Amino acid sequence: MQNSADRSRFRRRLLDWFDQNARDLPWRRKKSLYRTWVSEIMLQQTQVVTVVEFFPRFIRRFPDVPTLANASEADVLKQWEGLGYYRRARQMHAAVQVIVDRHEGKFPDTFDEVIALPGIGRYTAGAILSIADDQPWPVLEGNTARVYSRLLDFDGDVTTSAGQQELWSFAESLVSRSRPGDLNQALMELGSEICTVRAPRCLECPVSRHCLAFQQGDPQSLPNKGTRGMVYEDLQQAAVVIRRGTRVVVRLCGPNEHWSGLWDFPRFTSTPSATRAKLARQVGDRTGLSIRLDQPFRQIRHAVTRFRITLDCYEATDVSGRLRRSKDLRWADINELDDLAMSVTGRKIARAIQKR
Ligand code: SF4
């Protein structure tokens, strides 16, 4: 797409396709800066089908900035449970405090003000302002990176700053004053529905005549993600320390931990050769309790971005001693676990022990 006439034809074809094929998603039915922001944050690293379920519930509970700002962080995290990546919820809660302090509770509508909010980068600021307010800002995220790479037949590493620069420049060249929000949504929709990772449906693609990778015949080889496409295995062990069959030890994850602000069971990174005795010692050091561990009662597998977690869960027997005094460590009734915000894997452990 070397010239502006070509880009105009591209936009027209893509928007025609979007007008006919746009999915009916809850956040598209009524637009506002706040609702678009909530949906964009939820959609980061979470599948659309999951967000479709969570978005209406979250909006009912927190319909506007003041309601979200007045809620406790624990309440926000609880409503976020199941979406994962809880840092997003904490940053949203921090962002609404800033909006109340600096913008009188009204979601800002300039790029500089929006990007200054916690948890918002260049993509999210552009997406919010283009989608909710039709401002002409470009977008670049996972779906559009794939689409742009293929349209350009760009085989440079898209995870490097040079690769990102190339794709952002292309995104900027596509922006127009006419329907910029719809164009951005159409580009992302094309990536998620037609120009998919493994099997792009080029014969159904409304912009195939503009696509250099299609013409070269090998679009699925793009984008080039360099070594960042690698998947890492993460072995973990968790100990469920139960007393009298009804109470269990839980700990609140600290500010520098992955699941900061969420409750979890004593959990440790492991190795294939780690022993139960070692885990029992680690639990003892952390809790002050003396325990013995049975065979694992459950193995949980869970994928988070590039990490594949394998979590072996053990039940502790012969529990003795006194739980260390700490505001981050306590006994909880097994039925009370439902009221505590937990990570996806923490919740799976809780469900497993509630069913026993
Ligand atoms: S022609 Fe194929 S590779 Fe190119 S944008 Fe369309 S779906 Fe993607």
Image (cartoon, rainbow, N blue to C red):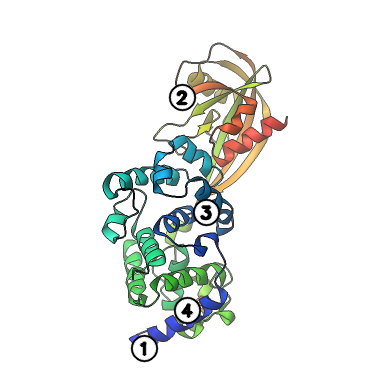
**Are the residues tagged 1 and 4 within 8 Å (C-beta)?**
no
The disc, 4 or 2, on the residue closer to the chain's N-terminal end is 4
Mark 2 crowd level (few <14, some 14–19, many ≥20, 10 Å Cα): few
> Which residue was labeled with disc 4?
15
Callout 1, which amino acid?
Ala
Mark 3 crowd level (few <14, some 14–19, many ≥20, 10 Å Cα): some
The disc, 4 or 3, on the residue closer to the chain's N-terminal end is 4
Q: Quadrant of residue 101?
A: top left
Residue 158 appears in the figure = no
Q: Is residue 182 above or below residue 259?
A: below
SS class of the residue under badge 1?
helix
SS class of the residue under badge 4?
helix
- Residue nearest the viewer, comparing 121 with 69: 69
Q: Position of residue 74 (x, y in %)?
A: 47, 35
SS class of the residue under badge 3?
loop
> Which residue was labeled with disc 3?
46
- Residue nearest the viewer, comparing 307 with 206: 206
Q: Quadrant of residue 24?
A: bottom right
Q: CA distance from mark 1 to mark 2?
A: 62 Å
Q: CA distance from mark 4 to mark 3?
A: 25 Å
> Which residue was labeled with disc 2?
328
Marker disc for residue 5: 1
Seen at 39% across and 45% down, the residue is 66
SS class of the residue under badge 2?
loop
Quadrant into which the C terminus falls: top right
Q: Position of residue 59 (x, y in %)?
A: 50, 50
Callout 3, which amino acid?
Thr
Mark 1 crowd level (few <14, some 14–19, many ≥20, 10 Å Cα): few
Q: CA distance from mark 1 to mark 4?
A: 15 Å
